[in-house]
Amino acid sequence: MDDRGIPIVAHRVLSLSSAFHTLLSTPMSERNLQFRVGLFVITAVGIAGALIIQFGEVQKYWKKTYAIAVHFEEARGTHPGCPVRMNGVTIGEVGQVILSENEPGVLVVLQIHEDRRIRRDAQPALVQSLFGDAAIEFSGGQSPEYLAPNKRLKGLTSQDPMKAVENLEKTVSTTLASFEATSREWQSVGRNINTLVETERGSIDDVVNQAAIALDTFTQTMQNASKTMTTASHTLESTNRLLDDPQLQANLKRTIATLPQMAEETRQTIAAARSSIQKMSENLDKLSMATDPLAEQSQTLVSHLNGSLRQLESLLTELNEVATAVNHGDGSLRKFAENPELYNNLNKSATSLSLLLKNIEPIMADVRVFSDRVARHPEILGVGGALRGSSGIKNPDEEIEQAGFQEPVKPVRRPQP
């Protein structure tokens, strides 16, 4: 209810009170009095109900909500009715607090107002004040998608302020114990000083100087202790601020959530390395099996290799002798390489031979024609051939008589009796 509704209700109450006073002040019968009293009671009850509905939290019983379950490791100070906020604005309240039976921790059921939407990446965190009042705070989130009803989330628990105070108390107790030990040392120093003053009057100045130095050291120690206390206080405050930051808690939670995946990837990497090593061992075994026959025949191979090397050495020796003969001054190749006149003579001989071959070609052609003619007309080699020339062309109708050739006598067949 806004601030304008309070004066209106008060004005109505005053109006009803004045009307009731007017009714009571006028003379009436007993029936009229009972009627007026009943009317006043009904009006008062109606006004009281309206005030309860207006100023109380009765509207939550018919306001529509949806449930979101959040699991916490511990939920100190959480009870039904605790506020649920997002960015400082109340968006619902705690409906139930259930001890989880399947896993350690507490399951808190939140009743979120229907008109309040929570983003999918919003992180719930349980925060506590110094007085122990608990509340559940949602981070804003940046996802464009929203959580559907009846979803389950993992919540973060902030550090208990009382535990921080207990830790600070332990630190202060340790510091006070150190101060007490220092005080006892100073008492011992004082007793020693008194003893020195009583026994050695001449060394009082030295003792005073040492005491001044010790006092200066004690002062520096106290200053360092004060700085240490201040630093511890600042560290504690910074730690509380960091631990209360929902975003940091969400990042830490996501990091912890990725640890199983990292462990699984590491396990897979180790398994792959083990498989690779096993395959390498198998390949080495196969290579060993393949090289075993070579190892068994190594002696034979070495002997063959030695024989081949000896043959190669002999060949190289012969080549060396050939090269020595070539490089010798009396050798033909050496003379041919160093005497240009010999090369020129050889070149001229080759040229003359080429010309001679060209001149022999017509003679060879004539010899080929002559041999062809002799093959066609061998009678030209006899006397008849010398007396009777021939055209050199073979005539199929012409009978050629060869010198010294006589036709055979045909046999005469006798009649049979």
Image: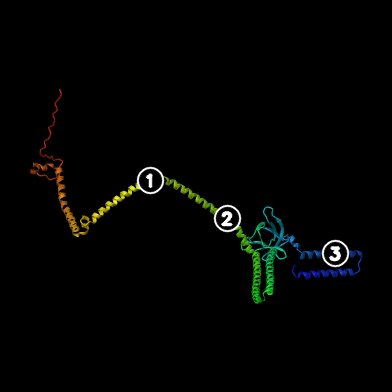
**Taking the image as drawn, is residue 72 in sight?**
no
Quick one: 229 or 412, which is closer to the camera?
229
Residue 299 is labelled as 1
- Position of 404 relative to 98 (above/below): above
Quick one: 4 or 397, which is closer to the camera?
4
Which residue carries the number 2 mark? 263
Residue 41 is labelled as 3
**Residue 345: percent from left, percent from top:** 17, 57
Say what secondary structure mark 1 lies in: helix
Residues at marks 3 and 2, CA–CA distance in whole angstroms? 74 Å
Depth check, mark 3 against mark 2: the one in front is: 2
Residues at marks 1 and 2, CA–CA distance in whole angstroms? 54 Å
The residue under label 2 is which amino acid type?
A: Ala
Dot 1, crowdedness within 10 Å: few (<14), some or many (≥20)? few
Dot 3, crowdedness within 10 Å: few (<14), some or many (≥20)? few
Say what secondary structure mark 3 lies in: helix
As drawn, the residue found furthest toward the top would be 417
Q: Quadrant of residue 147?
A: bottom right
Specify whether 11 is left or right of 246: right
The residue under label 1 is which amino acid type?
A: Gln
Specify whether 357 is left or right of 150: left
**Taking the image as drawn, is residue 286 in sight?**
yes
Quick one: 30 or 146, which is closer to the camera?
146
Specify whether 143 is left or right of 135: left
Depth check, mark 1 against mark 2: the one in front is: 1
Residue 221 is labelled as none
Dot 2, crowdedness within 10 Å: few (<14), some or many (≥20)? few
**Residue 118: percent from left, percent from top:** 65, 61
- Look at the numbered discs 1 and 2 and tell me whether their residues touch, using CB distance below 8 Å: no
Say what secondary structure mark 2 lies in: helix
The residue under label 3 is which amino acid type?
A: Val
- Position of 314 relative to 66 (above/below): above
